[in-house]
């Protein structure tokens, strides 16, 4: 049996380099992918750092923000060939359950989650299905191509908004997702302000062209002084900011909970009714990966400042600690040696 290098989650906050069986093509529509780079997601940080309420991920190969190269294809694969540069939707839907047939593939009843329920990208090879794999131009640098998965999640949420020129928008959180939300809203002609408590992240966001502010109880007054009104759109890319978003939103404003709103006990929810607010959620990827590839190939976002660290695969644990401290933003792991 052929083996490959992988980093498994040995225990909480502990990764171990091991040799595990290399994936084998078993179904006609499968594709074997040589992983070139895999960036670290906040989900990797969370599930590796503390016990969750679901199944333990101890022993798993985490990682799902993958850029790779097609190494082998199943006999039914017609749209890829060996050597193609690809990115992957890691949330494999079945296509036949009631949710999939209704168009809610991101809520598939039989979903396989790469790096969570099946082995992920902190390894030399992964296996996926033809329907979950997407070409990406080799003109896109590897480190930028690694944004495809988080960008596609962001675009799924962004597609639910109608941000047009002249609108006002507040983004809570200056992680990579928050900064991409802010940049895209700016590209659409909106006035944008991003709220972030971490000074390092604010500086990185500013370097990318996004105006930022530390959290303040006077946010509503700041917005009125700055724009003459509150925010037509509030985007929570940090989690737990619904109360602040309700306060900052303009009449008939829209709030997108991209990150989990969490339980809030001290927030005033009455303005949802009195201000006629619209509140919606967003969950992973739903037919937005091809849009993410187009955005990356068009080079319309300033992503370079967000890439704070490029590390070898063996330093995944260090990368996660950098994320916890707020020093790390987009952290790229080199899995294959680069020419």
Image (cartoon, rainbow, N blue to C red):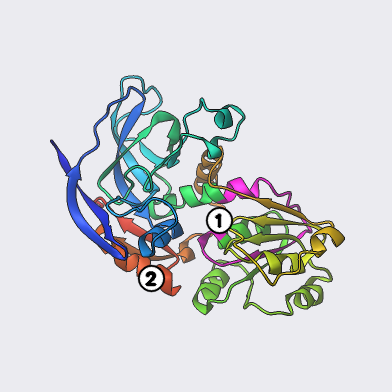
Number of other residues with Cα within 10 Å of mark 1, as a class: few under 14, some 14 to 19, many 20 or more: some
Q: Which mark is residue 193?
A: none
Q: Are marks 2 and 1 in contact (CB under 8 Å)?
A: no
Is the residue 48 above or below the residue 90 in the image? Answer: below
- Which element carries disc 2, helix, strand or loop? helix
- Residue lying at the far right in this picture: please name it: 274
Q: Residue at x 45, y 56 (%)?
A: 53
Q: Position of residue 164 (x, y in %)?
A: 75, 52
Q: Which residue is disc 2 drawn over?
A: 322
Is the residue 163 above or below the residue 23 in the image? Answer: below
Q: Which residue is disc 1 drawn over?
A: 301
Q: Where are the magenta residues, as a range?
A: 154-177
- Left or right: 158 in relation to 59: right
> What is the spatial separation of the Cα atoms under label 2 and label 1, in whole angstroms?
24 Å
When asked about the image quadrant of residue 46, the answer is bottom left
When asked about the image quadrant of residue 230, the answer is bottom right
Q: Residue at x 52, y 65 (%)?
A: 175
- Left or right: 334 in relation to 148: left
- How many marks are shown on the rendered structure? 2
Residue 174 is covered by the magenta coloring = yes
- Residue lying at the far left in this picture: please name it: 1
**Can residue 97 be seen at all in this image of the molecule?**
yes
- Left or right: 17 in relation to 102: left
Indicate which label's residue lies in the foreground, 2 or 1: 2
- Left or right: 85 in relation to 34: right
């Amino acid at each position: 049996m052929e083996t490959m290098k992988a980093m498994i989650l040995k225990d909480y906050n502990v990764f171990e380099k091991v040799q595990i069986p290399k994936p084998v093509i078993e179904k006609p529509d499968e594709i074997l992918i040589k992983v070139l780079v895999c960036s670290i997601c906040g989900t990797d940080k969370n599930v590796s750092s503390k016990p969750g309420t679901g199944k333990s991920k101890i022993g798993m190969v985490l990682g799902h923000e993958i850029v790779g190269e097609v190494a082998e294809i199943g006999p039914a694969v017609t749209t890829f060939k060996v050597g193609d540069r690809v990115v992957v939707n890691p949330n494999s839907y079945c296509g036949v359950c009631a949710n999939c047939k209704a168009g809610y593939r991101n809520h598939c009843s039989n979903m396989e989650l790469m790096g969570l329920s099946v082995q992920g990208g902190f390894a030399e090879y992964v296996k996926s299905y033809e329907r979950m794999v997407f070409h990406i131009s080799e003109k896109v640098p590897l480190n930028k191509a690694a944004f495809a998965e988080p960008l596609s999640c962001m675009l799924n949420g962004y597609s639910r908004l109608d941000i047009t020129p002249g609108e006002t928008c507040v983004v809570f959180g200056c992680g990579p997702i928050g900064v991409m939300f802010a940049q895209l809203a700016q590209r659409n002609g909106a006035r944008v302000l991003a709220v972030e408590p971490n000074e390092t992240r604010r500086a990185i966001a500013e370097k990318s062209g996004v105006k930022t502010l530390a959290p303040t109880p006077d946010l509503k007054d700041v917005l009125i002084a700055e724009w003459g009104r509150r925010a037509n759109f509030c985007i929570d890319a940090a989690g737990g900011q619904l109360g602040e978003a309700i306060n900052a939103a303009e009449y008939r404003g829209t709030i997108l909970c991209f990150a989990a709103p969490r339980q809030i006990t001290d927030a005033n929810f009455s303005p949802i009714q009195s201000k006629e607010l619209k509140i919606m959620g967003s969950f992973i990827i739903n037919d937005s990966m091809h849009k993410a590839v187009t955005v990356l190939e068009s080079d319309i976002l300033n992503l370079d400042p967000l890439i704070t660290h490029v590390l070898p695969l063996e330093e995944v644990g260090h990368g996660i600690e950098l994320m916890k401290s707020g020093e790390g933003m987009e952290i790229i792991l080199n899995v294959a040696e680069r020419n």
